[in-house]
């Protein structure tokens, strides 16, 4: 018994010594540095503080829309070429002030981007937009071509009218495989409307996005909730944007006089943005380079990140 007790004590002492040594090693080791440059700060716009995060080096690109959700969506490789600026847009997409969404217009959204550009001290800037909020980036480029050196549009609608919404639904009905439709039906049973109505507008919006995953991803089982979890955004603002600000929005006639280099990325299996609806605009828009990603839906920067980076970097080098 005494021998076993001594062995136990020796073991505890040895483990304790090893743990102490490990603590010393860990404490002596410097913290790991990010693989890309990161800075943060506050920009004061119209007397309102706007926190922002900057990631990467190179061409400065303001991310429109739900900017706080986008940092993990871009690769470190891409951030070696582009400095992404994610702004906490107080007057539009942030969840802190949903009461004022009725005051937001396309004019105010475009002005917000311009004030961010000015506050960053830049004469020209790149704008990045994804999905419907990407139309703000496009609108900014059309209104202020002298202040935009590049526009990057990923899975952005060419227009947003009642006719567009009908074509989007028709594309799903005629193109989606039965297996994909079956997954959507399973998701609807798992996340029914009655359940979503018990949640906050923000959580309901996020889970509705998850429910519609088969319409957004090449892999119909993909779950994007991780991109929404813990993020601040205003579902009220999104609803106003989609239902009021974009009502009857069609920039295609003005695209014919475009002078800004535009990179357009579309996913073959994006049932939110039928890729072929861009066909006419592609033919009539100068300075537009488009790429179709055959194994992607709404997020080619995630689903085909290597090819997405290759094509975007190649375009940036060619459009200098």
Image (tube, rainbow, N blue to C red):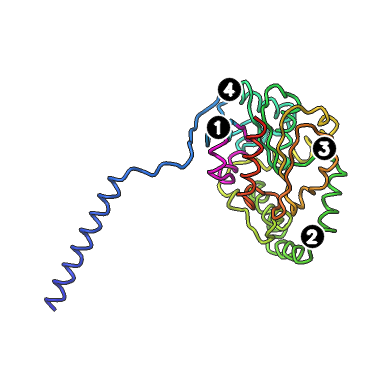
N-term-proximal mark, 3 vs 4: 4
Within 10 Å of the Cα at label 2, are there few (<14), some (14-19), or many (20+) other Cα atoms? some
Residue 197 seen in this snapshot: no
Within 10 Å of the Cα at label 3, are there few (<14), some (14-19), or many (20+) other Cα atoms? some
Magenta highlight range: 61-83
- Residue 89's disc is none
Mark 1, secondary structure of its residue: loop
Query: Residue, x 83% and y 30% (percent of image)?
Result: 256
In the rendered structure, the answer to whether residue 178 lies left or right of residue 79 reads right
How much space separates mark 2 and mark 4, taking CA atoms? 45 Å
How much space separates mark 3 and mark 2, taking CA atoms? 26 Å
Q: Which quarter shows the N terminus?
A: bottom left
Q: Nearer the viewer, mark 2 or mark 4?
A: 2
- Residue 176's disc is 2
Q: Which residue is mark 1?
A: 58
Q: Nearer the viewer, mark 2 or mark 1?
A: 1
- Residue 119's disc is 4
Q: Are marks 2 and 4 in contact (CB under 8 Å)?
A: no
Q: Which quarter shows the C terminus?
A: top right
């Amino acid at each position: 018994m005494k021998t076993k007790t001594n062995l136990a004590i020796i073991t505890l002492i040895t483990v304790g010594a090893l743990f102490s040594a490990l603590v010393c090693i860990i404490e002596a080791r410097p913290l790991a540095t990010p693989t890309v440059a990161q800075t943060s700060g506050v920009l004061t716009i119209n007397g309102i503080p706007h926190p922002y995060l900057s990631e990467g080096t190179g061409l400065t690109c303001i991310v429109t829309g739900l900017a706080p959700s986008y940092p993990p969506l871009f690769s470190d490789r891409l951030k070696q070429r582009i400095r992404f600026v994610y702004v906490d847009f107080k007057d539009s997409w942030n969840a802190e002030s949903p009461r004022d969404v009725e005051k937001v217009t396309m004019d105010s959204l475009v002005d917000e981007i311009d004030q961010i550009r000015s506050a960053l001290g830049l004469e020209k800037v790149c704008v990045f937009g994804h999905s419907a909020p990407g139309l703000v980036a496009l609108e900014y480029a059309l209104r202020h071509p002298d202040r935009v050196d590049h526009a990057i549009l990923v899975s952005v609608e060419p227009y947003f009218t009642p006719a567009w919404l009908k074509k989007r639904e028709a594309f799903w009905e005629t193109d989606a495989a039965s297996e994909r439709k079956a997954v959507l039906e399973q998701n609807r049973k798992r996340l029914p409307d009655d359940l979503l109505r018990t949640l906050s507008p923000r959580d309901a919006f996020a889970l509705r996005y998850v429910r519609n995953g088969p319409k957004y991803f090449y892999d119909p089982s993909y779950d994007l909730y991780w991109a929404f979890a813990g993020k601040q955004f205003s579902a009220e603002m999104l609803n106003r944007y989609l239902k009021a600000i974009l009502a009857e929005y069609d920039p295609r006639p003005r695209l014919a006089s475009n002078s800004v280099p535009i990179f357009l990325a579309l996913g073959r299996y994006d049932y939110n943005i039928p890729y072929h609806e861009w066909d006419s605009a592609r033919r009539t828009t100068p300075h537009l380079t488009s790429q179709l990603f055959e194994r992607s839906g709404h997020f080619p920067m995630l689903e085909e990140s290597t090819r997405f980076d290759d094509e975007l970097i190649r375009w940036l080098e060619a459009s200098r």
